[in-house]
Amino acid sequence: MTDRALTVVRAGALTTVQDLGRPGYAHLGVPCSGALDPEAVRLVNRLLGNEEGAAVLETTLTGCAVRTRCAVTAVVGGAPCPVTVDGRPAAWGTPVRLAPGQVLEVGAAVRGLRSYVGFDGGVAVAPVLGSRSTDLLSGLGPAPLADGTALPLGAATAVRGPVDAAPWPGPPDELVLRVRLGPRDGWFTPAALRTLATRAWRVSSASNRIGLRTRGPALERAVEGELPSEGMPLGAVQVPPDGRPVVFLADHPTTGGYPVVAVVREADLARAAQAVPGTVVRFVPYR
């Protein structure tokens, strides 16, 4: 490995390499994967002058720390968090210049769940099926980071323009997800569909990159029995036997056998990625 690299000092609860994923392989059983908050990744990369899909680090709740082997510019975005360089406070949401050997510490999220750490040139691990993303369910891409992991960086050829302020959206206090009913809404009673449209759930602590699980009222089935496995899109609201909706996120399985009562509009899923356990969730049907 060249000196254009970094070493993980503290991996945190879960830190993975993510880009914008590997779409187009669902027929092979490979989900899109990729960053759960792709808009944050695009903004981090724009601030660095990278291609918008350059690979970054996605942290979960507790942040991470890395030591650079070269001079590099970094941006920390997504969930707001404290940032330090060699223990001294540094800027969140704007470019920070690092000298060789310095340690960039990304602290625990103070709002939201997932912060994104980008570097000029991007994280240059070997791509799999056109993506550098870690897919936890399929086991594709690099393993979640561990202390001591070394990661190569791409060539720093970017040219950045001046930025006075970047439009970072804040994590939601209440998660409102617009949904289109179906394809199996007919498997639920009319009362269950009214419940879906009018009641609130809360984000469960069992949520992960595969799905956002909820706790709250159960949706009553009108049709009992088993459903043959069928394709599952990103944002599918699947209802397991306990009746509590599960929203499929980036690492979701490509098939499933529980009925899908609705599908979340893809533009709303980035907010789902930043919703901490206990956040109120509402589903709003639209046509």
Image (cartoon, rainbow, N blue to C red):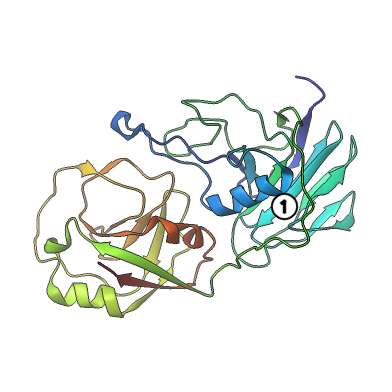
Residue at image coords 28%, 46%: 232
Q: Is residue 227 left or right of residue 215?
A: left
Q: Looking at the picture, how far across and down is residue 175, in whole percent? A: 46, 70
Residues 160 and 172: in front is 160
Q: Quadrant of the C terminus?
A: bottom left
Q: Is residue 261 above or below residue 190?
A: above
Q: Is residue 150 left or right of residue 285?
A: right
Q: Quarter of the image holding residue 173? A: bottom right
Residue drawn at (54%, 70%), measured in percent from left and top?
Answer: 172
- Residue at 64 percent across and 41 percent down: it is 56
**Residue 70: x percent and y percent?**
85, 31
- Look at the picture and state if 284 lies above or below 113: below
Rendered location of residue 48, percent (x, y) = 73, 44
Hey, which residue is sitting farthest front in the picture?
A: 161
- Residue at the far top: name it: 1
Residue 62 in view = no
SS of the residue at dot 1?
strand
Depth check, front residue: 250 or 162: 162
Please tell me how many numbered marks the rendered image carries: 1
Which residue in the structure is indicated by mark 1? Answer: 76
Identify the image quadrant of residue 125: top right
* Number of other residues with Cα within 10 Å of mark 1, as a class: few under 14, some 14 to 19, many 20 or more: many
Q: Looking at the image, can residue 9 be seen?
A: yes
Image height of 128 relative to 111, above or below: above
Q: Amino acid at mark 1?
A: Val
| Quadrant holding the N terminus | top right
Residue 85 coordinates in the image, percent (x, y): 87, 50
